[in-house]
Amino acid sequence: MNNTRENILKGVKRAVIKIGSGALTADNGLNTDVINSISQDISSLMKKRGLEIILVSSGAISSGMRKMGLSKRPQSISQQQAIAAIGQGSLILSYEKAFKNYGQTVAQILVTRDDFTNRKRYLNTRNTVFMLLNWKIVPIINENDTVVVDEIKFGDNDNLSVMMANLIGADLVINLTNIDGLYNDDPRVNKDARLIPLIRKITGKIEKKASSTPGALGKGGMESKVRSAKNISLCGIPTIIANGLKENIIQAIFDGKEEGTLFLPQDVPMGRRKHWIAFTKSPKGKIMVDRGAEKALLENGKSLLPSGIIAVCDRFSPGDSVIVINKEEKKLAVGLVNYRSNDVERIMGHKSSDIESFLGYKYYDEVIHKDNLVITNEITFLG
């Protein structure tokens, strides 16, 4: 084990393990060999090392597709919801049977993005997960595809793993897929492509190396996984992308074998609240600002005042997430707004001292306070 991996792995007490559809499904349905392997590894690590592990699992839709004899993912929301309902039972039953072989109990938690954006539901989800971990039970998390609609979707379970890692304060994320990790070229077309074992910082060049082609059963390709690793790193959490088709891959990782690609965390992590603002709240609208406000936000770390606003797009309410853009519609920041969109339109271009005269009330001087604002050059939007 190299020193970097050793230092990271020896400090892990709580981990999020995400496994994708590409590793979970076989030609005739769910890949029970993979499910058995990860169940064995997780059970062993919990008992022998006392680890707390949360499993984020795809597979409901792909399992339902196999049951229905479909080769391509349905396009309509209603079809995807129905297929997920068909496959979800088989998925959790397979996990329950596999974990039972190793004396381990599991619990299923189905979530939507609303469960993370609504503060009360966010805390309820967090409390439930921590209670299960306290009881030595493995929470198995999946998106509630049977009821979800586009505006409350995570996009894919790579994004869900980012939110779960932040939710529970994980020390490590392991993202299992059907490829060994990040290569310097596409290994499907270049037989000389080499695996990159360590990424110290995810740059634009690194992101371009990631393939954007998803598998037939899943939604997230390598690009999604690298983007998620980048966003998890902002919390100060490392990620390992590895091949979930390899037997006992999780155990091998914790034994220090050079499996997959390790992405190091950011040296100075973003606070959990700002991470939540950046990656969990779905933006409801946009606010366009002038050059002066752009400079104040990007260079001086100031709050957004009404005087620098020149346009409002879409409808939003106080507490909603909005994207701040410049005149060229470049994304500058994302933040929680203090006023509804109609009121922002009425006060834009005016001084904070004039807010009450225009609205008849004043909650705040700022339209978005700097403490609730994240500059977007620090992040990659999750959708």
Image (cartoon, rainbow, N blue to C red):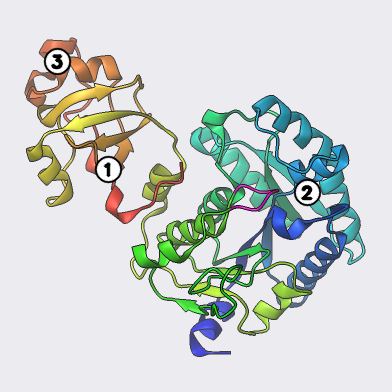
Residue type highlighted by circle 3? Glu
Residue 93, compared with residue 360, is above or below; it is below
The circle drawn on residue 312 is: none
Name the quadrant containing residue 120: top right
Mark 2 against mark 3, which lies toward the viewer? 2
In this rendered view, identify the residue nearer to me: 136 or 236: 236
Magenta region: 214-219
Q: Residue at x 55, y 42 (%)?
A: 155
Q: Residue at x 47, y 42 (%)?
A: 280
**Is 278 on the left-hand or right-hand side of 239?**
left
**Is 347 on the left-hand or right-hand side of 26?**
left
Assess disc 1: are there few (<14), some (14-19) or many (≥20) residues with their C-alpha within 10 Å of its C-alpha: many
Q: How many marks?
A: 3
The image position of residue 30, as x and y in percent, is 84, 53
- N-terminal-most mark, 3 or 1: 1
Which residue is tagged 3?
A: 356
The image position of residue 307, as x and y in percent, is 9, 28
Dominant secondary structure, magenta: loop
Mark 1: secondary structure: strand
Which residue is tagged 1?
A: 333
The circle drawn on residue 107 is: 2
**C-alpha distance separating marks 3 and 1:** 26 Å
The image position of residue 264, as x and y in percent, is 45, 72
Quadrant (top left/top right/bottom left/bottom right) for the N terminus: bottom right
Mark 2 against mark 1, which lies toward the viewer? 1
Magenta stretch contains residue 354: no
- N-terminal-most mark, 2 or 1: 2
